[in-house]
Amino acid sequence: MKYLVDKFPQATSGQLSWARSRCVCAPALAAVAIKRLGMHKSALINNVALSTAISRYVPVLEAVTFQDIVDKGWKHDPPKAISDVLESILGAVLVDSAWNYDLAAAVTQFVLSDVLEVLTPTLRKDPVSDLMIWTSCSGCRRITFQ
């Protein structure tokens, strides 16, 4: 978050929060894991269904741009295990550095640099968020989806 505050000093807390959520959402982390770290090439997966799901999604993540992930991440639904492993790796950096926050933050910023580069404080909301805001502004108090 400090990175975003430093990059966008005039942004509101809502804009910063929205940008942060786009950076750490499952599709963004999965894209980083595949495109930047090539995690799928070295991960040992002992579950056939998960291995198949990841193998099927790798070409999608390799083809998508980081700008598209930030703008339309809601369109992508990669296997959650991909983003979970990246989060675990970044957590391991913090633990292995003897809880050196500055070092872990620098590594995280480096690993996520492709996503961080395309973030702006004026990102559009996803269609579901737009719908929820519109309906609440129209006086609706309860929404159900079928």
Image: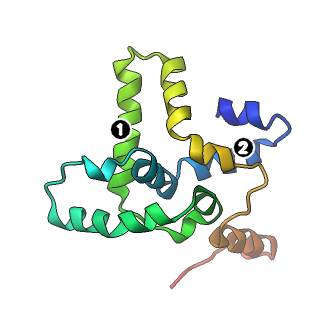
Q: 47 left or right of 75?
A: left
Q: Residue at x 30, y 63 (%)?
A: 54
Residue under numbered circle 1: 88
Place of residue 48 in the rendered image (x, y in percent of width and height, measured from the top left):
15, 65
Foreground residue among 82 and 1: 82
Foreground residue among 120 and 17: 120
Color style of the picture:
rainbow
Q: Which residue is drawn at 32% across and 54% down?
A: 81
Crowdedness near tag 2: few (<14), some (14–19) or many (≥20) residues, C-alpha within 10 Å: many
The relative height of residue 118 versus residue 2 in the rendered view (above or below) is: below
Foreground residue among 88 and 117: 117
Residue under numbered circle 2: 16
Q: 49 left or right of 54?
A: left
Q: What residue type is labelled 2?
A: Leu
Place of residue 132 in the rendered image (x, y in percent of width and height, measured from the top left):
68, 71
Place of residue 4 in the rendered image (x, y in percent of width and height, measured from the top left):
70, 37
